[in-house]
Image (tube, rainbow, N blue to C red):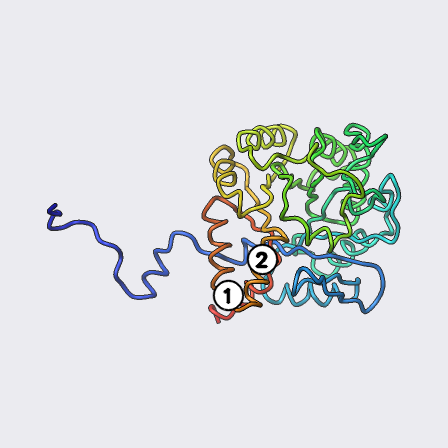
Amino acid sequence: MRYPQHRPRRLRSSASLRQMVKETTLSLEDLVYPLFVVHGKGIKEPVPSLPGVYQYSLDCLQEEVKEGVSLGIKAVLLFGIPAYKDSKGSSAYDSEEVIQKAARIIKDSYPHLLVITDVCLCEYTDHGHCGLVKEGQILNDSTLELLVETALSHAREGVDMVAPSDMMDGRVKAIREGLDREGFEKVSIMSYAAKYSSAFYGPFREAAGSSPSFGDRKTYQMDPANSREALKEVKMDIEEGADIVMVKPALAYLDVINRVKAETLLPVAAYNVSGEYAMVKAAVEKGWLEEEGIVEEILTGIKRAGADLIITYFAMDVARMLNRRSG
């Protein structure tokens, strides 16, 4: 077969030109840094299954946030480990609990940092499920009232965005109406719109102490086999008032991220979850992978698939990398 004399060629050029025409580039604006907050003082407790990830008491959290801001981190997502748990998840909406205090402190110190808070009951219930439970069944509608109270308790501390991760039907509408009713129209909602019942969540549940004490979450999280269902869930959350929609996890769901991005004009977030992080860390520890290269490739792939925001435990490492390259 003979090719045309002036056939198109791959770009053969200097590194600077290749950088200029690169189609997908990671930036600090892409990153959301998830943080786990606990009671106490002087605590920076390693999470064994997540090397480099810690549970922070409020004083240590301030130091970590300070470093993140100095590196150019623009947004954090807060998860709380409460002082007490009960069947109703009462500590989730307790104004003196750790997540409310953390939000208050961070916004006072860094008013321009985007503070996002997780809204769910699983970390706060003694049974570990995301909703109220009666006779082994999840009570969807009764749970909505408590999710609204949780979101309001965060909004009162000045957070910029709440992120309902529970997957209860109708929770976005209920939270939006509750926020508006209390005068928090400017508090945005980032909905875990397509949250799959995934095997990748194990390390997070260790970090947050949120493993269910019975059964599983398959009745209210999505089947990993389904992508059309994700589009339906996203559409419903948009109609209910979501400002950002999320796909979780990321790596095994790049096709879902891409489909969601094609179907909506809203920003799309993707959660590079704990199991995805832990696999990389384990392989790096064994010497099987080079960390910086593999992390950049993974996050670039998530962004290329369509994610506008990437929630990742690698945020600080990537921020250091980007600062080194720019400086």
Residue type at tag 1: Trp
Q: In this view, does 161 lie above or below 34?
A: above
> Residue placed at 13% from the left, 50% from the top?
6
Badge 1 crowding class, 10 Å Cα cut-off, few under 14, some 14 to 19, many 20 or more, is: few
Q: Is residue 275 left or right of residue 102?
A: left
* Residue indicated by mark 2: 279
Indicate the secondary structure of the residue bearing disc 1. Answer: loop
Q: Residue 288 carries which label?
A: 1
Residue type at tag 2: Met
Q: Quadrant of the N terminus?
A: top left
Q: Picture coordinates of residue 98 (x, y %)?
A: 82, 54
Q: How far apart are marks 2 and 1 (CA)?
A: 11 Å
State the image quarter where residue 229 is shown.
Answer: top right
Q: In this view, does 290 lie above or below 196?
A: below
| Among numbered discs 2 and 1, the one appearing first in the sequence | 2
Indicate the secondary structure of the residue bearing disc 2. Answer: helix
Question: As rendered, which of 36 and 22 lies closer to the eye?
Answer: 36
Question: As rendered, which of 283 and 79 lies closer to the eye?
Answer: 283
> Residue placed at 60% from the left, 55% from the top?
312
Q: Is residue 112 left or right of residue 24?
A: right
> Residue placed at 58% from the left, 57% from the top?
279
Q: Residue 209 carries which label?
A: none
